[in-house]
Amino acid sequence: MAHELSEEKRELFETMPIPKAVATLAIPTIISMLVNLLYNMVDAFFIGRTGNSYMIASTTLALTLMLLHLAFAALFGIGGGSLIARLMGSRQLEKAKNVAAFSFYGAAAGAVLYSVLIWIFMDPILDFLGASENTLHYAEQYVLYVIVLGSLPAVLSLTMGHLLRNVGYSKQASMGLSGGGILNMLLDPLFMFVILPPGQEVKGAAIATLISNVCSCVFLLTVTYKASKNSPLSLSVRDVFGIDRASISKIFAVGVPAAILTALFDLANVFLHRLSAAHDDFTLAAIGIVMKIERIPNAVNGGLTQGMLPIVAYNFSSGDHDRMNKVIKYVRILGLCVSAVAIVALLILAEPITRVFISTSSSAAAQAALTVGIAARLLRIRCLAAPFQFLNFSSSVCMQGMGNGWGTMLHAVARELVFYIPFMFLFNSMMGSDGLGVALPASEICSAAFALYLVHRTIKKAAGLRKK
């Protein structure tokens, strides 16, 4: 059992030059996020080869339920992981082990409960999300394998990834999550076009995703077990019962807002999909393609911010706020540069990138071409939100690292309920489907300004407490 941090880990958090420390934690995280994004895109790519806009629309509906079950990984992975990093900073390693065990089994319980509820209420939920008679059957296939059967390994994999990153094992976390993504890319064409008959492509993609998530989970279980011998991690049920109420409160103080942020983001997508479906299935398919493309810069920036979180949390707890502030500023500059490059690339390449996801040479070429046109137009509008999305991501992560769950919650509510969802309805009524594009940059600008204010206030308050 680890009673103190290794010299290597202490150097990483305390003295390593900031660019090197951020790179050590962020680069593996960025790689894993990009690989996992890539395998989601591969699903869309292979399904798009059919030229069937209904199949693409069905996976867009299923994405909503996939994002929602990730709230459990955010609750216990981010809530528990950020607390573990803070406990490491204050040298409370035994408490950190209790937190790790509680987070692991809490995530498992949440995933199982979610799977059962989706299994029981699948059809009414899909109907509420906007499934039509053309998309319902495909959506049911995908949800059965990826959510009902696959929620547990998917949630545990992401939770363990968060926990491992926060104790300095970012490379190992990346290997597990990326390995699952690579396996999924290899299995997709096998199940979609070789093992299963034509017309079962969505089911094939879902089975491939399930198998890859199981393999990723098994790998990360092995890594976590080995890491627990030299770090404040634990898979022991006994350690779950050693946790105190104060630690549970601190997990939930950060984890609940992180989960709510995920859930509110998903709620916004529910409204986005319903408004898109109200136009037609082609607009729904188009918005699904756009959301996959715009996740590329978001994955890079998400990796940067997740790599930043352990350093922010550790140094906040240890009292080295100067190092913490330098890390925040450094990552902020990098993220804004990534966002600027993304805007230029997507403005220029919107149509050819969109065509990657749906074939316009199939028997349904006219429908596919219509989908491409809508998607390219929406992508050019929505990509303008990239820098402001990054500022929102990084601000939330900073507050999570500093244990400011209330600020994270307030930001999440403002971002989705005060700005994005109302703007979505407003601009949709004014501009039609183009309004669904305009709503994103408009809302992200407003919420980013609010987020920066909250972070500034959190840092100022912490500095004041330190002086006392």
Image (cartoon, rainbow, N blue to C red):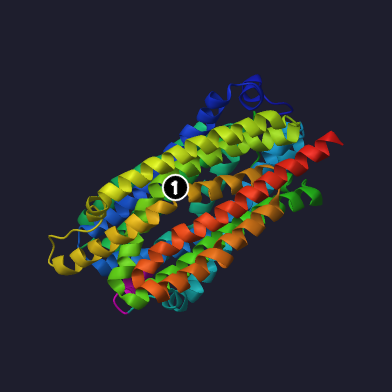
Q: Nearer the viewer, residue 18 or 90?
A: 18
Q: Which residue shows up at 56% across the image and 47% down it?
A: 159
Q: Name the quadrant containing residue 328.
A: top right
Q: Which residue shows up at 56% across the image and 44% down it?
A: 394
- Counting from the top left corner in percent of width and height, residue 195 is at 23, 56
Give the left or right position of residue 113, taking residue 437 as reference: right
- Counting from the top left corner in percent of width and height, residue 54 is at 27, 70
Q: Which residue shows up at 36% across the image and 69% down it?
A: 139
Element carrying mark 1? helix
Residue 199 visible at all: no
Q: Nearer the viewer, residue 7 or 338?
A: 338
- Counting from the top left corner in percent of width and height, residue 182 is at 35, 42
Q: Which residues are magenta?
A: 133-140
- Please check the rendered image and state whether residue 137 is part of the magenta-colored stretch, yes or no: yes
Residue linked to disc 1: 298
Q: Amino acid at mark 1?
A: Asn
Give the left or right position of residue 354, taking residue 455 as reference: left
The correct choice, above or below, for 286 with respect to 8 in the image is below
Q: Nearer the viewer, residue 348 or 269?
A: 348
